Amino acid sequence: MRVLRFAFALASLAIGCAIPPSRSSTEISTRDMRLSISLESVSTGTHVRASLVGPFGGFDLDGGDSFSLYAAGQPTALVSDGVYTFTAEPTVRSGDFVFDLVRPADRGARVTIPTPPDTELVADPPTARWLPVRWTPSEGFVTTLGVQGKCLAGGTVTLAQDTGSYALDLASLGPKGGGCTLTVTLTRSAAGSAYLLGEPWMSYTARQARTVEVAWTP
Amino acid sequence: MAWRSGLVAAALVASVGEAHAEPSSPDATTTRIPSAVEEVRMAAGGSLVSGSLLEGHGSRRPYLDAAGELDLAAQRFFTPRVGMSFALAFGPTLSKLSTDRQFFARLDLALLGAAVRREGVGGGSLVLGFGAGVSGGDRYWWGPIRAYPYFVAKGRWLASRELTFHAAYAFSPVDTAAAKALWVMEHRGELAVGVGLLQTGVRLAVTSVRGGDPYRTYDGVEAGVFVGLGVY
């Protein structure tokens, strides 16, 4: 093996090329990997995107290494783009998303990302000024309500506390006169990180978005 | 030194006896018989260094360096059986991976014992010893400054007054990188042929560094050639 490597080194030097780093995960320490995860829960399921990179960029999982996802307890296939990004589109809309890196010859790592409870956004009949909306409450997430429509300037309200209901003050959102269909969007998001042996190893963002349309006449 | 005196006396006798002969090829009157153990040598060489280095906590990255080297080596025996050696090497190191590898120097000192020593044409020696070395610079990725003990074995065959063959092997079982939980073993070998003062040869060094997280081996192979002037 050493002879082959040296022969390759000679050839590389002769043609003026450096030796490219290996793309095999077996050459990369778990502690040198970095994982970033993005979850976006929508009405049809959850968009999952994870990137797992090493000090030389992307790599192939070899040597029995595996990277798995369990969405709300269900094994979910992660599809690699061949570089370093993994994607999945589970129909699950909430619950714990567990990412499991298993390495027979190195440290494994398991991270759990909580998502807000599943919900639907319900709009009650609006008045000339108020638009009441309801959803399943939660804690630990940044919750915002956004309103858009042709008949008002629109805007976003960040809720100090997620109680599961809120009355939007349409008069404060720049009504232009006349009525239209309003689109109300509830988003709840969180971001965090995890450490491996005292060093940042994983970061994530989790976002839930729900929309509802309602006709409004001031 | 008695053997040298004897040789000189014999040469003088031969010279006197052939005072009226035609000049011929070098013989005992003009060419000194090389020593089986003594040596002073200056050489220049180049080598390629290929292997893998530890990056981060335990990732293995391949590398390829080219190194130039000037070295000065001396081996002196104070008694027929006991001597010492000195070797200084330095030169530039060019890396294909980075520009921070530029220069290195290495100094080795060893105490030697001649297990076998037979002077004269057809003779030779087998010398064993141990010593310590220190290197600085960027040639060795696991430490800008390292010190190490080593064991050495050297062989020499005096094929004729002009032609000599040399072999050397050194083994270093550990170095100061052990303080950083890196266990370094180094094998260095050299084969050379001397024709008169000229000596040329090849070098091969194999290093293995164990450590990191996960614990594994980082190999390196260095191969090169050299040419120099040696007096034995």
Image: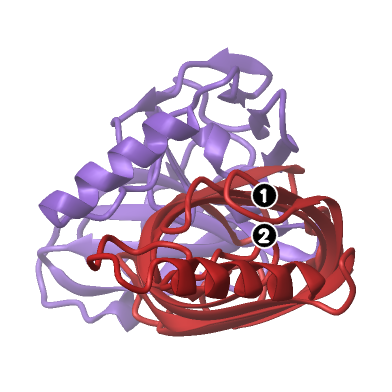
Classify mark 1: residues with Cα within 10 Å, few (<14), some (14-19) or many (20+): many
Tell me, yes or no, whether the two marked residues, 1 and 2, touch with CB atoms within 8 Å. Answer: yes
What residue is rendered at 57% in x and 24% in y? A68
Chain at tag 2: B
Residue B159 in view in this figure:
yes
Q: Colour of chain B?
A: red
What residue is rendered at 64% in x and 65% in y? B35
Q: Is residue A137 left or right of residue B176?
A: left
Q: Colour of chain A?
A: purple
Q: Nearer the viewer, residue B27 or B101?
A: B27
Q: Which residue is mark 2?
A: B36
Chain at tag 1: B
Q: Looking at the picture, how far across and down is residue A164, in whole percent?
A: 63, 52
Q: Is residue A81 left or right of residue B138?
A: left
Q: Nearer the viewer, residue B8 or B47?
A: B8
Instruction: Give whichever of discs 1 and 2 has the lower sequence position.
Output: 2
Q: Which mark is residue B124?
A: 1
Q: Nearer the viewer, residue B75 or A10?
A: B75
Three-letter residue code for mark 2? Ala
Q: Looking at the picture, how far across and down is residue A53, in whole percent?
A: 46, 48
Quadrant into which the C terminus of chain B falls: bottom right
Give the answer, above or below, for where A153 lies relative to B205. below
Q: Nearer the viewer, residue A79 or A121?
A: A79
Q: Are marks 1 and 2 on the same chain?
A: yes
Q: Quadrant of residue A200?
A: bottom right
What residue is rendered at 33% in x and 54% in y? A184
What residue is rendered at 22% in x and 81% in y? A174
Q: Looking at the picture, how far across and down is residue B214, in whole percent?
A: 74, 43
Three-letter residue code for mark 1? Gly
Element carrying mark 1: strand
